[in-house]
Image (cartoon, helix red, strand yellow):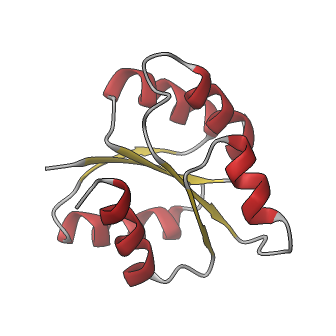
Amino acid sequence: MAKILVVEDNEMNMDMLTRRLQRNGFDVVMAINGAQGVELALSEHPDLIIMDMSLPVLDGWQATRQIKSAPDTYTIPVIALTAHAIAGDRERCIEAGCDEYESKPLKFPQLLEKIHMLLGG
């Protein structure tokens, strides 16, 4: 069972995403801010991270950079989630180290496709 770290500060989004991922057979670890996301990435070694980019304490851009610069976590794929679907955002997410990008409101089947692609299945 693949472990996914979901870093999301919105309680409703976290609940919806967590339940849907669990129904699809994933083990889910949750963080509510970027700093906690970095800590859990280092301690839990998830197979994939879903990172909201607008987070308190440490935003998703900074958290992703820290995860991608650490020797133990740099290979973990990160999917950026952002409500700021403006021109250049996808490129900015990729520059920060994200492997994929998904805009909100979330289209779960599309996200699931990206998760399976990044996990090699």
Q: Nearer the viewer, residue 66 or 22?
A: 66
Q: Nearer the viewer, residue 87 or 38?
A: 87
* Residue at the image point whose x is 67% and y is 32% from the top: 65
Q: Nearer the viewer, residue 46 or 69?
A: 69
In this view of the protein, can residue 53 be seen by the observer? yes
Q: Quadrant of the C terminus?
A: bottom left
Image coordinates of residue 109 in percent, x first then y, are 37, 83
**Displayed quadrant of residue 68:** top right
Report the number of numbered marks. 0
Image coordinates of residue 112 in percent, x first then y, are 35, 72
Image coordinates of residue 70 in percent, x first then y, are 54, 18
* Residue at the image point whose x is 37% and y is 56% from the top: 118
* Residue at the image point whose x is 21% and y is 57% from the top: 26
**Displayed quadrant of residue 105:** bottom right
Could you tell whether 113 is left or right of 23 in the image?
A: right
Q: In the orientation shown, which residue stands out farthest toward the right?
A: 87
